[in-house]
Amino acid sequence: MNFIRFINGSIKLILKGSNAYYAWLFFLIVLVVWGAFGYADQLNEGLITTNMRDSVSWAFYIGNFTFLVGIAAAAIMLVIPAYIYNWKPIKEIVIFGELLAVCAVIMCIAFIVVDIGNPLRFWHMLPLVGTMNFPYSMLSWDFFFLLAYLIINLTVVTHLLYCIFYKKPYNKKMAQIIVLISIPMAVGIHTVTAFLYNALPARPFWNSALLAPRFLASAFCSGPAILIILFQILRKITKFEIQDKAIWTIAELMVYSMFIYLFFTIAELFKEFYSGTEHLLYWKYLLFGIGDSKEIVPYSWSSITMGFIAFVLFLIPKTRKNFVTLNIGAVLIYASVYVEKGIALIIPGFTPDVLGQIYVYTPSITEIRTAAMIFSLGFLLFTFLVKIAIAIVFENYRISDISKKEKHLIREIPTT
C-alpha cells in the first residue's frame, strides 16, 4: 500500500506544472507522434525504408545506441567523487546522474529494437526466455550489462525517493554498496559495446585495443556535459540548489577525460599513418576522402575542431569557471562526441566495403523520425523523473501533500 501511494503521489507531481512545463511536454509529445508515424512505415515496409544496405548495415540507429551507452556510463563521473571521496557538494546531485543513466539505457534498448527490424525478435534478447546465444554472442553480453546497469540505477533511485517521500531513513549501507557496484558496471557497458565492434575481424577500422578506452574517455565527456547544463537550468527554474564548485569539479574531471581521449586518438593516428598498412584506407576516407568521395570529411573535421576547442575552454581555469564559456564548451563537446560516435565511427568502418565499393550513406527520413521518437520518449521520461526527484528531495514534497482523504492513513505509517 505504501508503494502504491508513492506511485500515486509521483503521478500527481508530473501532472502539475507551469505553462512552460506543459508547453515542453506538448512539444515532446508532438515529436513522439511524428516519429511514431515514421516508425510505422518501417514496420509496414521493413528496413528497406532506411538507407542501410548490405554495404552499410550499421548506421544511424547503432550510432545513437553507441552514443547513449556513453551517456549512461557517465553517471559514475558523479558517483566517484561522491562516494569514493565522500565529497558532499556532489553527493547531493548524484541522483540526477542515476536518472540520466536510467533514461539513456532505456533509449539504448529502444534503438536496438528498431535496428533489428521486426520488434518481435527482441524476445530473443531476454535471458532464459529467448535464444541469446550466450556466451558466444557479444550482443548478448552487451544487453546483459545494459539490463543489469538499468536495474542497479533504478533500484537506487526508487529506494532513495521512496524513503525521502515517507520521511524514512534509507538504507545507507545497501545504497552505497549498489552505487559502488554501478561503477564497474558503467565501465562494463561501454567496454562490452566496444568489444561488439572489435569482434568483427573483417572490419579493420575497429580492430584496435584502444577502442574501449577511447569509448570510455569520450563517454566521460559527453554525459557530464549534459548534466552541467541541466543543473544550471534546474537551479534557475526550481528550488534545486547546487554549488558552483560542484559544477566546476565536474568540468575539471571532464578535462582529464578529454586529455586521455585526445592522447588515445593521437596514438591511434600515429600507429596507422606511420605504419602505412592497408588499414590506413579507412582513416583516409574519414579524414581526407577517397577520390571524389569526401562526404564525411566535413563531419570528421568538425568533430575534431569542436572537441579541441572544448578541451581548451575546459583546460583554462578562467574559462572553465566562466559559465558562458563553460556552456559553450559543454555544447561543443556534446556535439563533437555525437558526431564521432555516429558518422565518424560507423561509416568508415564499412567504407570501402569488402568489394572495394563506396556506398554513400545518409540517414533516411524514416530513420530520423524514428530516432526523434526515441529521443523524445527518453526526454519525456527524464523530465518526469527529474520533476519527481526535485519535488521530493529539494521542495519537501511529502506523502502528506497528496490528499486530506488519506491523512488518517499517513499517521499510521512508521517514521523509522
Image (cartoon, rainbow, N blue to C red):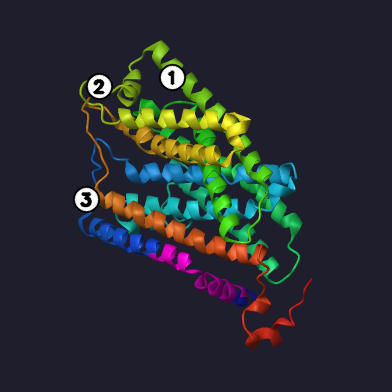
Q: Considering the numbered disc 3 on the image, is that residue within a helix, a strand or a loop?
A: helix
* Residue at 35%, 54% in the rendered image: 372
* Residue at 43%, 62% in the rendered image: 24
Task: Tell me if mark 2 has few (under 14), some (14-19) or many (20+) residues whose alpha carbon lies within 10 angstroms of its own.
Answer: some
Q: Is residue 113 visible?
A: yes
Q: Nearer the viewer, residue 213 or 201?
A: 213
> Can you name the residue that lies furthest to the right here?
416
Q: Is residue 191 visible?
A: no
Amino acid type, residue under disc 2 in the picture: Ile
Amino acid type, residue under disc 1 in the picture: Leu
- Which disc, if any, is residue 269? 1
Gap between marks 1 and 2 measured at Cα: 17 Å
Residue 120 x %, y %? 34, 59
* Residue at 46%, 37% in the rendered image: 332
What is the chief secondary structure element of the magenta stretch? helix
Side of 387 where 409 appears, left or right: right
- State which region is magenta: 6-26
Q: Which is more foreground, mark 3 or mark 2?
A: 2
Confirm or deny contact between disc 1 and disc 3 (CB under 8 A): no
Amino acid type, residue under disc 3 in the picture: Thr
Earlier-in-chain disc, 1 versus 2: 1
Q: Which residue is mark 3?
A: 49
Side of 283 where 224 appears, left or right: right
